[in-house]
Amino acid sequence: MKIQTTLSADYLQTKITQSGPWFYQFEFDNGVRTDPLPDGNVQRIHESRAQCIFPFLDRHFGGRWNEISCLDVACHEGWFAFQLAQRGARTVRGIDIRPERIDRANLVRAAGGFANTTFEVRDLLTLDPARDGTFNLTLFLGIFYHLEDPVRGFRAVRALTRELCVVEGQVARFRGNITTAWGNKDELRSGPPCVVVDADPQHARNGDTICLVPSLEALQRIVRAAGFTRTELLPPTSSLHEQYVNLDRAILFAFV
């Protein structure tokens, strides 16, 4: 959806240029748009996410968008948050640990006059449902596989979710279980694995040096262990980015 604005094209273009470089492409109805970084692979992943997530949400929430409160965790520049806001969501809150991302989100918010959105620099693990509230819809996109402790992350998201959480991200390629000895010499336990990899500096929380990337089966188990009662795996189609087709990335809809 293009963003409506009352700002002149020249003024907005100047502000956009001064705030770059941008990660997402925002388009305004006065012809101005942001130019994302020239990484076609990232943009195709982004397009695949949008292609899958929004039709599902539109079906699920139907004509009640004006009743829905939303939280976009690790919202980056707020692209997905603004798509929810333009659908008429009652409130949309975006959080991210990078101040420069929140600055860009607030620029778009001001340009579009989005009264139903707020953005702030926050860490998911500092949110408290008693203080910060809970949300009908939470977005947990492109983040869990950057966490040192994804189980804690999912528990935090579950505590903030009243109805539905959209989970998206990279999953390990291993299919099936691995086995470990457990306690008594004859006892063995099996389960789906996680891969331990070095954290990317631009994504890591303060002090994190590693992140755990779960297999698809491990991801589904972690989401249920966090307290979600049911999950739906989005079946990939050939029109999506190859990582979704190959189940190197997955989209889960997790229900409370």
Image (spheres, rainbow, N blue to C red):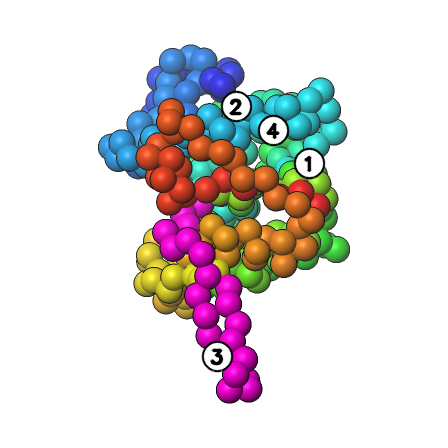
Q: Earlier in the sequence, mark 1 or mark 3?
A: 1
Q: Secondary structure under badge 3?
A: strand
- Label 4 and label 2: CA atoms lie apart by 22 Å
Task: Return the mark for residue 69.
Answer: 1
The residue indicated by pointer 4 is 57
The amino acid pointed to by label 2 is Gly
Sequence-wise, the earlier of marks 1 and 4 is: 4
Q: Name the quadrant containing residue 40.
A: top left
Q: Badge 3: how crowded within 10 Å, few (<14), some, or many (20+)?
A: few
Up-down: is 112 above or below 30?
below
Which disc, if any, is residue 112? 2
Viewer can see residue 75: no
Q: Indicate yes or no whether the magenta region holds residue 29.
A: no
Percent x, y of residue 126: 60, 59
- Nearest-to-viewer mark from 1 and 4: 4
**Amino acid tagged 3:** Ala
State how far apart marks 2 and 3 are (Cα): 58 Å
**Res 208 quadrant in image:** bottom left
Residue stretch rendered in magenta on the structure: 169-191
- Of residues 188 and 210, the one nearer the viewer is 188
The first of marks 4 and 3 along the sequence is 4
